[in-house]
Image (cartoon, rainbow, N blue to C red):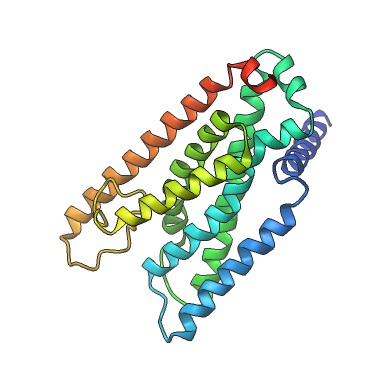
Amino acid sequence: MKIFDTIKRQIVMIFYNLKIIFGNKFIYFLLGAVGLFLLITILNLAQGQVLSPSDVYGILMLVGALLLFYPVAFGIQSDKDARTLEIIFGIPDYRFRVWFMRVLLIYGITFLFVLLLGFLLKVSLTNFPLFNMAFSVMFPLFFMGFLTFFLATVTRSGNGTAAIIIIISLVLMMFSSAIQNSQWNVFFNPWGNTNGTNAMVWANITIKNRIFLMAGGVVFMLAALLNLQKREKFLG
């Protein structure tokens, strides 16, 4: 009986945090992500293009980024507006557990959503390794998500974080063509080998790119948690 009570409390806690994370607008973000997914897919099909795994990767990454970005960028500002920062900072080390759990919850929801949309594409339009695709999409999302979280702890403003991330994304996209097949490309597409690069070389680049994205994401995560130690900076 205690096990069921514990599970019930955990489920209630998850839904409670989802309401806080998405500001009671979770359904709108789901609808927005689905709408973007349908729009991009229909536009590709309307142009007479058969979706390739490379196209699927791009679609799922954009949809995942849309679902991930708002709660990570605006999470701290939402707590500030709701006047819950004092409570979070009032309990030693509680803020680390709360925000870290929320970020993990956001990534979990994003992964499940990417997996679901990937499944729909797989059964209806094109064939590709579903779990491998969803897993690959999470690498750039991991990097960009924790970069966004770090910036949110610096600016303490959702709008400020959004503006900086948009600028950074535009700069990265401007240089992505020059480093398209490089391990340093944040938007590197593992299925985008259109230049006939040797398969072993391409696999090596993919592995190095994932190491780069994971290492960068961990650095930004630790930097964000370090910023959360500065209580007066958030409550001042």
Determine whether, in the image, residue 46 is placed left or right of residue 228. Answer: left
Quadrant location, the C terminus: top right
Residue 20 x, y percent position in the rendering: 75, 40
Residue visible at 77% across and 35% down? 13
Residue at (25% x, 64% y) in the render: 193
Place of residue 171 in the rendered image (x, y in percent of width and height, measured from the top left): 37, 50
Question: Quick check: 134 above or below 7?
Answer: below
Q: Looking at the picture, how far across and down is residue 44, in whole percent? A: 46, 78
Give the quarter of the image for residue 189.
bottom left
Is 150 displayed left or right of 158 in the figure? Answer: left
Residue situated in front as seen by the camera: 225 or 206: 225
Residue 183 percent location from the top left of the image:
26, 47
Which of the 4 quarters of the picture holds residue 219?
Answer: top left
Looking at this view, name the residue that lies furthest to the top.
Answer: 92
Instruction: Check the image and report above or below for 215 versus 227.
Output: below
The relative height of residue 7 versus residue 87 in the rendered view (above or below) is below
- Image height check: is 103 above or below 35? above
Side of 79 relative to 100 (left or right): right
